[in-house]
Image: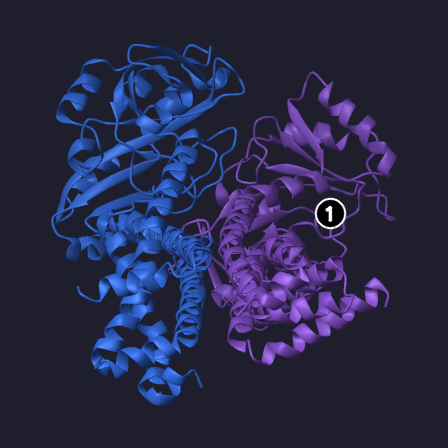
Chain colours: A purple, B blue
Amino acid sequence: MSELRQVVAVLYIGIGSLRERYTTAFVIVIGMACVVGVLTSMLSLTAGMAAAYLRPRDAARAIVWADHAVFDQSLSLKPEDVATVLDTPGIAKAPDGTLLADAEFTMDTLPVEGYAAGSLKVDGLGPAGVALRPEFKIVSGRTFRPGARELLVGVGAARKFRLAVGSQIRLRDGAWPVVGVFSCGSDIIESHLVGDAVTLMAARRASGFAHVLVQLASVDAYPAFQNWLIRNPALSVFVERTTDYDRRALGVHAAFFTGMAYVISAIMALGALFAVLKIMYGAVRARTREIGTLRAIGFGAAPVALSILLEAALLAAIGALIGAVLAWILFDGRDIWVWGAFKLHIPPSLWLLGLAWGVSTAVLGGLLPALRAGRLTPVEALRSE
Amino acid sequence: MKLFPLAWAALWRNPTDSLLLIAGLSVGFALFGAMIAVNAAYQRAIDDLRMDRLIVSCAFDCGAIPIGYREQLARIPHVTAVAGQMWIGEHEEDARQPITVMFVDEAMHSAWPEFPMSAADWRALAVSPSGIFLTRKAAVRRHFHIGDSVAMYSGRDGTADGTGIWNFTVLGFIPDLPGWESASEGPDWNRDTIVGNLRYMQNWGRPDESSFVTVMRVAVDHPESARAVCREIEARYTNANPALRCVPARDDAQELADANINMRQISLGIATAGLFMILFLCANGIAESVRERLREFGTLKALGFGDGRIATLVVLETAIPTLLAAVIGGAIALAINVVVARLVTLGAINMPDLPLSPSTFGLALAAALAVALLSALAPLYRLRRIDVASAVAGR
């Protein structure tokens, strides 16, 4: 009999005997379900954030910040700096000849009852703001008119703060009506309100911008664009591709939590590993005579050991799948607010990670019992009680 | 106690199994203890803040409140003290080392008496306007010593003389503030608490900023007055320039926690999953042990052991490893907390200190006992129903 067939045969016998050992098998399954359930549930948050921040974007898009002010709350980019940035060669133009670049900023509104200050933000967009975001579309109402005190609300913010067309947002110069609801392909901007930058700036009584968003003529235009700005003695700015900015922003919000998810899952996996060790040792002990008989009729040590490992891996895989399914049922698609609206997401990669996590824990835990089973000689095995 | 040697002997009947069981349970309890500590830490970060301390800021992120508002606010009924604070910063001499100084006025020790500076510290700050106090964690992170001179650069237009350089002397260190900062660090802001004298900022900073503060701290006479006083402040300043927003410090912390990742809920969920794992592992261990020793239990019954004594023996057999594991797990959780505290001090992670209090240990032990009792239920039911003759005969 080939070694592979021997492995299958021993595994088949082992699985058949699970009926007598169902409680111990159950412990591996439940343990792995807990480990993988916790891992996938926690990572569903960062996967949801990554889906919002790291959407496929045009690599020819760049963002220009005032030096030392590389996040949205700053207003350090003066209008004259913006004019210089817009003069930089390499910026793409719309069919009507206007530049595809926009000076923008983000400001806080009065906190919504029960939410922290800064939870609800307003973005000031310029004339090219919408053209720079191809996914931007009005889902109800209409868009704001330049120069008018009107706002649009993103679908995420609308859901979270129960805002709709007709809602009033209090800004410094009075109440601004919400005239439309927009979506933007799950971009983080869906968690904000947007309005005309110049009008908002007058209401804010401030003259600075946070950044200039730029569509370059081509991906290759970026190095020259960056050099031109950095070497311009009249400017003190920092330039990066929007894809780099997205990664940076995700890192700020999700790095700690992702690390925590892995550390906690590793601790849980260690506990599960001890459980697998104990249970598989018990399984080898319970099947000692059976293993002895198999070895006596010609089964090799390696197929016996491998079948023990496979049994542990199979039980762990079932547990991992149960954990991932439970996490998916409970969390996938659920709305969550972490300084912005996200949807918890369990993508196929997370299912695979959970499965690999559970199976590798079980294989590690089953290794020593498998070696013990492989080393059993037929004589000592058959003599055991 | 007479049953203890029997239970102990039963536990070590199979040393490998018992050690693996205790190891698995210890890891489970370590996780449970650490998660309970995380939960308590985030809750304490809110509970430590008081309702009768109000935070008053610009309603529309102007970032500058006229210092003259201080006297007006002090005249509002139930207000007992008002103080101003202002943050200025950019970087130390080394441009890669960001620094932010929180300048406070002399009324701060009345408006925020819980702020961990002693009367002597306040006096020292009053007589040395360019002095600063740092929290202990900040001092460790920055390698500062008492008496050190520290230069801060805040941009050329940041000071009256146009150099943008501020010179400070480290006067001392203060205990770390409760809670944590959930805001992101950036070049303009970092979370180290460094306290300076507002008078220095007024004399050395930009003249147009000298009569402004970022935030007013207001103390009220009773926690029950807090929300009413806040409403009164917002109503009085609704049409002022700038309009004001007021929130009690505890409400502010609660809202901040709710806007962020809900660590209290998550830690409870993980602790529950950990406890669930412990329960299954423990129940399986005792069920296996009883199944393998049915003859022994039959003999004990034949010798006159009643159901009560048998039950006590089984519970004891379950309780010994779980209690041992709870103690070992508690010690591991303590070690985890020490590592986390060190990482927080070094600035590698940002979360509140994890206090592993006696109550956390007590909770772990109580959980261990509850798990032991629950795990023993099924084997006990089986033992009550065994037929002594069949058990002794090994059938």
Lateral position of residue A90 relative to residue B205, left or right: right
Quarter assignment of residue B105: top left
Q: Which residue is drawn at 42% across and 39% down?
A: B62
Q: Indicate the position of residue B305 as horizontal and vertical percent values.
A: 22, 79
- What residue is pinned by disc 1? A128
Q: Which residue is drawn at 37% across and 47% down?
A: B333
Lateral position of residue A165 relative to residue B73, left or right: right
Work out whether residue B206 or residue B23 is closer to the camera in this orientation and state it.
B23
Q: Indicate the position of residue A131 as horizontal and vertical percent values.
A: 76, 51
- Number of numbered labels in the structure image: 1
Q: Quadrant of the N terminus of chain B?
A: bottom left
Work out whether residue B98 or residue A379 is closer to the camera in this orientation and state it.
A379
Looking at the rendered structure, the kind of residue marked 1 is Ala
Lateral position of residue B219 relative to residue A54, left or right: left
Work out whether residue A302 or residue A139 is closer to the camera in this orientation and state it.
A302
Q: Residue at x 40, y 66 (%)?
A: B282
